[in-house]
Image (cartoon, rainbow, N blue to C red):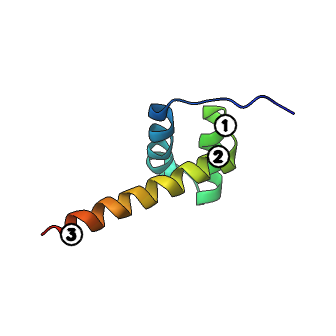
């Protein structure tokens, strides 16, 4: 079994942004995830989970903003 690598919160926040920025350079979301994950030295599934978490956080913030109007 391999040791778990701990990444900083800043790294976890930047990775999905890098994915979004590089999406236009790839033919599919899957290829984009694989490419960015490889360049960051993390597993594709890890990047997918971080992206999904960031999406849920963004959705919750958008909802809170619209509800306060």
Q: Are marks 2 and 1 in contact (CB under 8 Å)?
A: yes
Give coordinates of residue 19: x percent, y percent. Answer: 51, 47
Give the residue at the far left of this rendering: 69
Q: Which residue is identified by label 3?
A: 66
Callout 2–callout 3 Cβ contact below 8 Å: no
Look at the image and tell me whether residue 49 can be seen.
Answer: yes
Task: Decide which of tag 2 and tag 3 comes sooner along the chain.
Answer: 2
Q: Is residue 24 left or right of residue 27?
A: left
In front: 69, or 45?
A: 69
Give the left or right position of residue 29, taking residue 13 as reference. Answer: right
Image height check: is 44 above or below 28? above
Q: Position of residue 14 (x, y in %)?
A: 45, 38
Mark 3 crowd level (few <14, some 14–19, many ≥20, 10 Å Cα): few
How dense is the environment of label 1, judged by Cα within 10 Å: few (below 14), some, or many (20 and up)? some
Q: Which secondary structure, mark 2?
A: helix
Question: Between residues 8 and 36, which one lies in front from this camera angle?
Answer: 8
Q: Mark 1 or mark 3, which has the lower sequence index?
A: 1
| Separation of marks 1 and 3 at Cα, in angstroms | 35 Å
Q: Which mark, residue 42?
A: 1
Residue drawn where x is 51% and y is 29% of the image: 8
Quick check: marks 1 and 3 in contact, CB under 8 Å?
no
Callout 1 secondary element: loop
Q: Which residue is mark 2?
A: 46
Residue at x 44%, y 45% (from the top left corner)? 17
Residue lying farthest to the right in this orientation = 1
* Quadrant in which the N terminus is drawn: top right
Q: What is the number of callouts on the image?
A: 3
Q: Quadrant of the C terminus?
A: bottom left
Point out the frontmost of discs 2 and 3.
Answer: 3
């Amino acid at each position: 079994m391999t040791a778990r690598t701990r990444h900083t919160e800043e790294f976890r926040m930047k990775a999905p942004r890098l994915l979004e920025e590089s999406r236009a350079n790839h033919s599919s979301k899957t290829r984009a995830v694989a490419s960015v994950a490889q360049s960051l030295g993390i597993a594709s599934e890890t990047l997918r989970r971080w992206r999904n978490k960031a999406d849920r956080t963004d959705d919750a913030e958008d909802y809170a903003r619209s509800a306060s109007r």
